[in-house]
């Protein structure tokens, strides 16, 4: 039987704020400095404001009574994210930092990026953890990379037992997907012997996730050559990806490595608010007063509106703007997102318009998948034939017998190409890479040591003389299961 406190001790313990289950107890700056300087909690007695906590957000929990009015959340939301959700409400002793007009956070323009959590020094804004009850848990910190899109943000992942507890940014802010949309860890032990049956599969059409590592993709190409398989490429969905593959180059891909010049035009094409939101953080940080921003969109987001962006619903409108009058044009484009929204060839036509009108074009390509590497083969349009195999993808007509199940890429070591045109080595979480496509190629098909190709960027961007048609592709299981959880 456990002993319990008497009434006096229980009341005393209940008043100790650092023993109430605060999830920020291990990172709280107030606690840290209070202990360092031996502060006494009864030295300055007086009235204390008590506020109702805010549980309205799906991902963040606010306790205004802990707030020390430092204003970091307000500045970060305004200066880094570009929304300015937080502000001071009332004045003097009654002053408190809250969403504007004291509205619940869940009813505001908040995009749940969690940047305010990183800035809060006292646990007044904390993430909602998977557990039903708040608890001050502390896991093991592991350096890694985000697994959700092609930007490839560095992060620090907090691991607890066989799960991911929290995700923290390393330098720059994270987005909602990178911080809160946490995948389940696959603890299954895979065996190479389970894949021996693939040797009997001939003349099949293979739909493989673009989030496989570059080594796995090259190994899959080698297996396909031996077995007569036809590889359907994720990036063949857009003719712009096809055109760059045919030209054997990428555009400048320099958005994250250079500043925007004076008298520049920025064109944002694709659903960046949901798919690649960190690109908008970067844009907010570097655009200038004379930068003109245009969004190819059907609905201009509040975030883009606050940057002074203008919505265009057709590329003909951009043609009338006069792109040649700007010192440079910066094109941020997610080709698959654009073509799915506005129709086949829209991304290619937009690129050719910009390249033809302005000789100082700087284009960066983005994807919902984390690895751009396989885009180099987007122009190789596969002939869909025979049996269909799905590797971490799923079509409406597929069944488990056609699905090749493997650990997701965040649990495997491998190389990935991001939207900065950087090849980076993944740092796996709960490493489960005994069975990968490369391992299957080696142990079952005798394919040893595949070679990878370096991606090249064009020194000067010119229109692409290409005609084609986007292909259909099944859902990527990681993206549909985790990246689109909302």
Image (spheres, grey):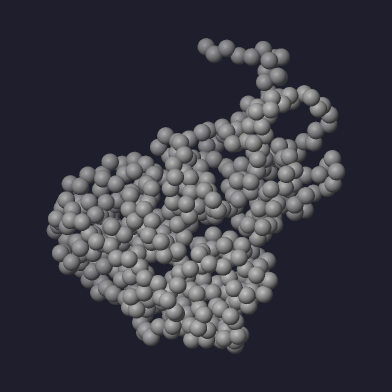
| 248 w.r.t. 38: above or below | below
Q: Residue furthest right?
A: 92
The front one of 393 and 285 is 285
Nearer-the-camera pick, 39 or 475: 39
Relative to the observer, which residue lies in front, 274 or 118? Answer: 118
Residue at x 63% of width, y 35% of height:
28
Residue 327 image position (x, y, % from top left): 58, 80
Q: Residue 418: x percent and y percent?
A: 42, 61
Q: Residue at x 31, y 71 (%)?
A: 377
Q: Residue at x 57, y 42 (%)?
A: 128
* Image side of residue 431 versus residue 289, left or right: left
Residue 256 screen position, x and y as percent: 51, 64
Residue 194 versus residue 5 in the image, above or below: below
Residue for point 48% across, 49% down: 155
Q: Quadrant of residue 175?
A: bottom right
Q: Is residue 276 above or below residue 461?
A: above
Q: Is residue 238 visible?
A: no
Q: As drawn, is 47 to the left or to the right of 264?
A: right
Horizontal side, residue 347 vs residue 176: left or right:
left
């Amino acid at each position: 039987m456990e002993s319990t406190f008497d009434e006096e001790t229980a009341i005393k313990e209940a008043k100790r704020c650092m023993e109430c289950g605060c999830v920020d107890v291990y990172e709280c700056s107030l606690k840290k400095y209070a202990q360092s300087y031996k502060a006494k909690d009864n030295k300055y007695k007086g009235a204390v404001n008590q506020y109702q906590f805010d549980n309205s957000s799906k991902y963040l929990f606010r306790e205004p009574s802990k707030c020390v009015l430092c204003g970091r959340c307000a500045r970060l939301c305004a200066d880094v994210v570009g929304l300015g959700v937080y502000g001071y409400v009332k004045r003097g002793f009654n002053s408190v930092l809250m969403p504007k007009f004291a509205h619940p956070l869940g009813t505001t323009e908040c995009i749940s990026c969690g940047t305010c959590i990183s800035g809060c020094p006292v646990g007044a804004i904390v993430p909602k953890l998977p557990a039903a009850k708040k608890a001050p848990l502390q896991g093991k910190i592991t350096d890694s990379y985000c697994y959700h899109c092609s930007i490839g943000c560095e992060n620090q992942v907090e691991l607890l037992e066989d799960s991911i507890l929290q995700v923290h940014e390393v330098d720059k802010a994270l987005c909602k997907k990178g911080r809160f949309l946490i995948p389940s860890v696959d603890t299954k032990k895979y065996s190479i012997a389970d894949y021996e049956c693939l040797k009997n599969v001939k003349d099949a059409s293979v739909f493989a996730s673009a989030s496989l590592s570059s080594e796995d993709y090259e190994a899959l190409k080698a297996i396909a050559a031996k077995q007569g398989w036809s590889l359907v490429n994720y990036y063949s969905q857009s003719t712009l990806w096809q055109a760059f593959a045919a030209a054997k180059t990428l555009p400048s891909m320099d958005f994250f490595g250079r500043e925007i010049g004076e008298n520049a035009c920025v064109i944002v094409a694709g659903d960046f608010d949901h798919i690649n939101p960190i690109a908008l953080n970067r844009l907010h940080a570097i655009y200038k007063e004379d930068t003109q921003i245009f969004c190819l969109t059907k609905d201009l987001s509040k975030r883009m509106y606050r940057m002074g962006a203008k919505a265009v619903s057709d590329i003909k409108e951009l043609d009338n703007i006069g792109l040649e009058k700007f010192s440079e044009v910066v094109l941020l484009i997610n080709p698959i997102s654009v073509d799915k929204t506005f129709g086949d060839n829209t991304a290619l036509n937009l690129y050719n318009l910009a390249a033809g009108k302005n000789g100082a074009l700087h284009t960066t390509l983005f994807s919902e998948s984390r690895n751009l590497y396989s885009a180099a083969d987007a122009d190789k349009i596969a002939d869909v034939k025979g049996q269909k195999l799905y590797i971490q993808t799923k079509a409406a007509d597929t069944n488990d017998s056609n699905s090749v199940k493997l650990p997701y890429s965040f649990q495997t070591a491998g190389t990935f190409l991001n939207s900065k045109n950087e090849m980076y080595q993944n740092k796996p979480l709960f490493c489960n890479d005994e069975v990968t496509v490369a391992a299957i190629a080696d142990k079952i098909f005798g394919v040893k040591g595949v070679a990878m190709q370096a991606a090249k960027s064009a020194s000067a961007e010119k229109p692409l003389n290409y005609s084609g048609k986007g292909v259909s592709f099944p859902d990527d299981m990681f993206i549909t299961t985790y990246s689109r959880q909302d």
